[in-house]
Image: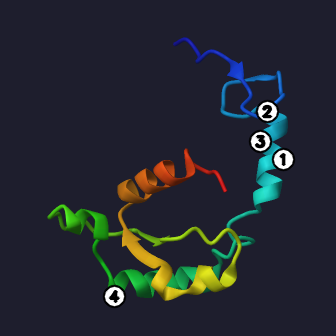
């Protein structure tokens, strides 16, 4: 099976080629800047909160608006918190979404997946 062609790294000014969005150098830099999930607040306390929230709000609100009853799997931050822990923990900033609706929201708002 042919492999996918190499393309330029998306980092401005970088001329490296990669099979992914960023070359190996810039992927590592991005991961270091962003921090891991626990460093961004998604720790054991969040995991417990998530279970309680999804128990109380089991259906995806976007799907409900369309008349579908899809179980939610993600507690989404309506307004991205970007490290602001007050916004991160504000229950008025949370909504239940299924993975598909969350992925769509992320891609639409951030211009792609994994951007911070």
Crowding near pointer 3: few (<14 within 10 Å), some, many (20+)? Answer: some
Distance from the alpha carbon under mark 2 to that under mark 4: 44 Å
- Tell me the mark number nearer the camera, choosing from 3 and 2: 2
The numbered dot on residue 56 is 4
Residue 27 image point, x, y percent: 77, 41
Hey, which quadrant is residue 43 in on the image? bottom right
| Contact, mark 2 vs mark 4 (Cβ under 8 Å) | no
| Contact, mark 2 vs mark 1 (Cβ under 8 Å) | no
Q: How is the image coloured?
A: rainbow
Residue 82 image point, x, y percent: 67, 68
Crowding near pointer 1: few (<14 within 10 Å), some, many (20+)? Answer: few
- Tell me the mark number nearer the camera, choosing from 2 and 4: 2
What residue do we see at 79% from left, 32% from top? 12
Residue matched to label 3: 27
63 is higher (above) or lower (below) than 91: above
Who comes first in sequence, dot 2 or dot 1? Answer: 2
Residue matched to label 1: 29
Q: Quadrant of the C terminus?
A: bottom right
Tag 1's secondary structure?
helix
Q: Residue furthest top?
A: 2
Who comes first in sequence, dot 3 or dot 2? Answer: 2
Residue matched to label 2: 12
Residue 112 image point, x, y percent: 55, 45
| Contact, mark 3 vs mark 1 (Cβ under 8 Å) | yes
Who comes first in sequence, dot 3 or dot 4? Answer: 3
């Amino acid at each position: 099976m042919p492999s996918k062609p190499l393309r330029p790294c998306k980092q401005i000014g970088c001329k490296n080629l990669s099979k992914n969005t960023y070359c190996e150098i810039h992927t590592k830099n991005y991961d270091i800047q962003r921090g891991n999930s626990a460093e961004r607040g998604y720790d054991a306390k969040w995991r417990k909160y998530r279970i309680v929230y999804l128990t109380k709000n089991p259906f995806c609100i976007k799907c409900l608006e369309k008349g579908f009853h899809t179980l939610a799997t993600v507690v989404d931050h309506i307004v991205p918190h970007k490290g602001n822990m007050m916004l991160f923990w504000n229950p008025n900033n949370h909504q239940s979404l299924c993975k598909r609706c969350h992925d769509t929201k992320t891609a639409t708002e951030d211009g792609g997946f994994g951007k911070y």
